[in-house]
Amino acid sequence: MRKYHSVLSEMEKRIKEGQYSPGQKLPSVRSAAEFYGCSVSTVLRAYGELERTHAIYSIPQSGYYMVEQSEEPGPAGGSGIVDFASASPDLNVFPYLDFQHCLNKAIDRYKYHLFTYGDALGLDTLRHTLVSHLAEYQVFAKVERIIITSGIQQALEILARMPFPNGRTEILVEQPGYDIYLRYLEAEGLPVSGIARSAAGIDLRELEVRFASGRFKFFYTMPRYHNPLGTSYSTEERKAIARLAGKYDVYIVEDDYMADLGAEQRFDPIFAYDPTSHTVYLKSFSKIIFPGLRLGAAVVPEPLLEAFRAYKGYTDTSLLSQAALEVYIKNGMYGHHRHKIKAMYAERIQAVYEALARHNTEGLIEVSVASSGVYLQFKLPVTVNLERLVKRLAERKISVVSGNGFYLSGYRKREKFMRISISRARLDQIDEGVRAIVRETARGSGW
């Protein structure tokens, strides 16, 4: 993590100092990795954060470019940026004092044990705590199968590289899907193929054909509040995916990073419907609740444990952070904060729908249906020039993300959309931002 922050800080410094001019193409991912002496995935994460803050933008199969500055005034009602792009949690509701208390308690409880190297599998007491914690999400697992990772990204990279008992090497991913992981797989030259997923779901017959081909070691999926669509699989779809995994010996990598924002009365993950132990369940503790902790948990099937441990290799997550998280979960603070932030994000999602009802009267924008989470898909008319629309909105200080970056480079069956994130969009800005998006979309239809 230290290297990532160092690289990001240096990039931001170079941009601030004017070393890159507006519209200029930035160094390629590989060139930047060589220059900063870091991994490709570190550069991808840094570029991804710069793109989310709208310092740069990407063009598929071309590269990353500096955003061109505009002298035009912002939209009526305020001069600040309406942030529909950032995927980071809202820092205004981060429980600083509560977590500081947990850090102090952790130091008192574990003292010098926190300053040893620890176990590569994670703090033993935290892993035992997670047995009951994960059971709340209908994930019932023995402590031996729970491994603490440096965020979910580390687990995904390990799974991509390590061998699987089915002897296959290719990875199947949803299209659109998690952009940073897609860029990582492509940059590393790993065999990967895409299968279409829309706001309506996935074609289970096509999925079965793919599984039956015998090519895929695992299928990577976000069943709940998908990034970037914002939608969730139905119970029937989750059950079917679990059944197909066992039938064709294809593992499922279930990224349930939005589990804490679930608004449904009951949402059992694919893991809960899998009697053949073909599902790797991934749970994040940093994406929504603790943005700086970089902690995740992987529940790994027995046949994969040895290889996963070998590829993880060493202790790389802070024992102090792990101990503080254990205290935070045990004393009930985690559950309290989860309910608070879930209600706040649900209110913002509802505000987006209400703004669309007021301003999208011509039905130019199709929106995905999500009751919570942080993402929505704004599907656009085919006549709109998407990149130009994103640029025009940036000039009006409306920050959004183009959907193009959420596809594999060679994937052709793309939907034209923007991903809208409400995690840092202020409630009082949402109507203003949606109105501007609708107006620029209407204008773009004539381009």
Image: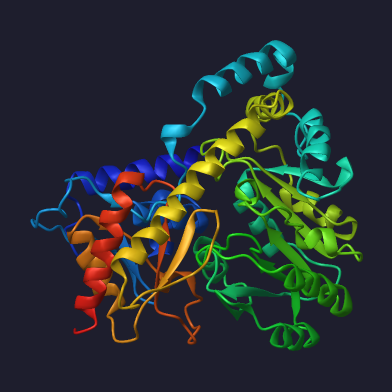
Residue sitting at 56 percent across and 21 percent down? 98
Residue sitting at 16 percent across and 46 percent down? 79
Residue 368 is situated, as x and y percent measured from the top left of the image, at 49, 69
**Residue 385 vs residue 40: left or right?**
left
**Residue 328 vs residue 176: left or right?**
right
Residue 133 seen in this snapshot: yes
**Residue 169 vs residue 417: left or right?**
right
Residue 88 is situated, as x and y percent measured from the top left of the image, at 45, 46
User: Looking at the image, which is closer to me, 302 or 262?
Assistant: 262
Check the image and report above or below for 343 versus 155. above
Quarter of the image where one finds residue 242: bottom right
Residue sitting at 80 percent across and 86 percent down? 212
Residue 64 is situated, as x and y percent measured from the top left of the image, at 33, 65
Check the image and report above or below for 90 versus 391. above
Q: How is the image coloured?
A: rainbow
Which quadrant is home to the C terminus? Answer: bottom left
**Residue 437 vs residue 237: left or right?**
left
Check the image and report above or below for 154 versus 275. above
Residue sitting at 81 percent across and 67 percent down? 164
Residue 55 seen in this snapshot: no
Residue 132 is situated, as x and y percent measured from the top left of the image, at 82, 37
Q: Give the total of numbered labels.
A: 0
